[in-house]
Amino acid sequence: MLNIIFQKAKAKDQDKIIIDSRIFFSVNKKKEWFSDKFVQLIMEKVDRVKVIRDFVLEDEDGNAIPPEYLSTGAKTAICIYKFPDMIFNLTQMGDNALVYALAVSKVTDITALCYRFLPYNLLMKVGFYKDYEPYNLSDPLEFAEDMRQWLEEESIND
């Protein structure tokens, strides 16, 4: 299940909010993550990067790069996978990385912060909650209007 909050104040535990996943990733990454098949899939599909060994990655041009060179979206997707109890900011992800966060939400409950429109066609594939309450995704136009209102409220209150 994916629970989305549009305001930091609505998080049940403020200490679990991670605003900048880039820093969180750099501080918390472990070399064993890079042997995980799901992490490798995220890196390959989002950034076209492969693991050479431990913290040594290879970009699409064959250059050796460190994990810090991964996109913010890939870092955020990996962090959501490795720390599903934390609240990461989906705004730092493009739709190409968002699909992996949504895949995680199919097997474990996650709560995420969001400051952008999310694609209806991706969200309708997962159990969706807003502010810890179930949300019915049956009408895409209603969802678009609701999302506009949620984001407007967020800009006023957060």
Image (cartoon, rainbow, N blue to C red):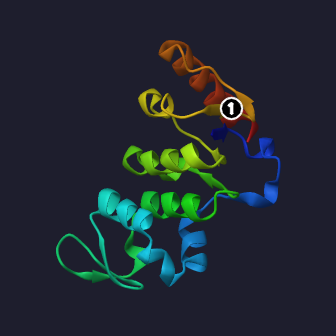
Count how many numbered circles sit on residues in the image.
1
- Residue 95: x %, y % from top left: 40, 44
Looking at the image, residue 97 lies above or below residue 74: above
Looking at the image, residue 97 lies above or below residue 75: above
Question: In the shown orientation, is residue 38 left or right of residue 142?
Answer: left
Q: In which quarter of the image is residue 121?
A: top left
Foreground residue among 92 and 125: 125
Q: Quadrant of the C terminus?
A: top right
Question: In the shown orientation, is residue 78 left or right of residue 45?
Answer: right
Question: In the shown orientation, is residue 81 left or right of residue 11?
Answer: left
- Residue 112: x %, y % from top left: 64, 47
- Tag 1: Cα neighbours inside 10 Å, few (<14), some, or many (≥20)? some
Q: What residue type is labelled 1?
A: Lys
Foreground residue among 115 and 123: 123
Instruction: Give me the residue at 56% from left, 21% from top.
Output: 137
Q: Quadrant of the N terminus?
A: top right
Instruction: Give me the residue at 48% from left, 17% from top.
Output: 140
Q: In which quarter of the image is residue 20?
A: bottom right
- Residue 107: x %, y % from top left: 57, 48
What residue is pinned by disc 1?
130
Q: Is mark 1 on a helix, strand or loop?
A: strand
Looking at the image, residue 66 lies above or below residue 81: below
- Residue 96: x %, y % from top left: 37, 48
Instruction: Give me the residue at 49% from left, 83% from top.
Output: 31
Foreground residue among 138 and 155: 138
Foreground residue among 102 and 72: 102
Instruction: Give me the residue at 61% from left, 32% from top.
Output: 128
